[in-house]
Amino acid sequence: MHDLIREHARVLADRLDPDRDRDDATTRLLDYYQHTAARADTLTRRQTRPALVPADGTSLAAVPALPGREQALAWTRSERASLLACLDHATRNGQDARVIGLTAALADLLRRDGPWADAITRQTTALEAARHLGDRLGQANALNYLGDLGRLTGDYAAAVRVQEEALDIYRDLGNRLGQAIAFLYLGNAQRLTGDYRAAARALEQALGIYRDIGDRGGEAEALNERGTLYRVSGDLAHAEGCHHQALDLTRQIGLSWDEAHALAGLGRCAQAAGHNAEAENKLRQALAIFRRIGAAEAADLLAELEALADAPPTT
């Protein structure tokens, strides 16, 4: 819509439409974007997460057809500006519950596409909104995301701190899925701080819970993370075993992102063992998957492959 037409419509609405009609129209628009973003999020996110609220059965007049991951991701990316505008409107008007819901629906998009600084700001706002409402699950989920973002941005000590806080809340709520995710992210952050023993305990807890609740995707991710921990600890045999288990599992249930991580893990194990040709083969398989699904990890993996190509040949 041309800017002048939009401004003319806005002036007419302010002049002619009753306040109640304008408020109702805004609410319908926000409902549409929040509902559709949440639906798209369930199709695109790589990990099952604790639901903030049960599905309410809301039926909207028109929603886009999102038959699969690619369509859902394309819709979310094309509507990103409008979704963030809705979130900003909710924040300005003190609509705490909507801030929590919209931020949760956009969390994986912001993690995937960045910028991470903006994602941290928005999750911090959602955390404050959840605290204002006394929404303990909303607090735990926001802390969980903040911990993951802290890890991604290199603030490992902060990542450990907020994950431990999230874990305490999930335990109080008896939320097993939340505990598994918190243990997983906590273990990742502890590994990066060099506390391998604590990381091993946390990842063992995550893997056990995922298996208990039958979350096979979470199990695959936990296996990959244990593989990484074993590799950096120098235990290549156990590292390869974890990544092979994860690879078999991801191929059974069709999890491309975790399949790529398993292949990358096996490639790094091969490189650590001095088998550069095998390492390159596995890393290239992982890169192809990351590129196909549009994962941010593709750039870093390409850099790894370029460095490997410059490495001296092995026997």
Image (cartoon, rainbow, N blue to C red):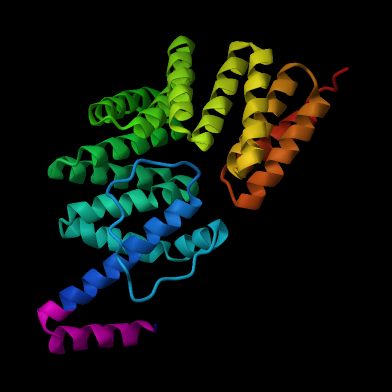
Task: Please identify the quadrant where the C terminus is shown.
Answer: top right
The kind of secondary structure the magenta stretch mainly shows is helix
Q: Which residues are magenta?
A: 2-21
Is residue 204 a member of the stretch shown in magenta?
no
Q: Position of residue 218 (x, y in %)?
A: 49, 34
**Would you say 221 lies left or right of 22 here?**
right
Q: Position of residue 68 (x, y in %)?
A: 54, 59
Q: Residue furthest right?
A: 315
Count of marks overlaid on the render: 0
96 w.r.t. 195: above or below: below
Asked whether 198 or 89 is in front, the reply is: 198
Q: Residue furthest left?
A: 19
**Would you say 295 lies left or right of 181 here?**
right
Q: Position of residue 217 (x, y in %)?
A: 53, 37
Task: Please identify the quadrant where the N terminus is shown.
Answer: bottom left
Is residue 8 a member of the stretch shown in magenta?
yes
Asked whether 199 or 3 is in front, the reply is: 199
- Where residue 79 sits, quadrant-wise, is bottom left
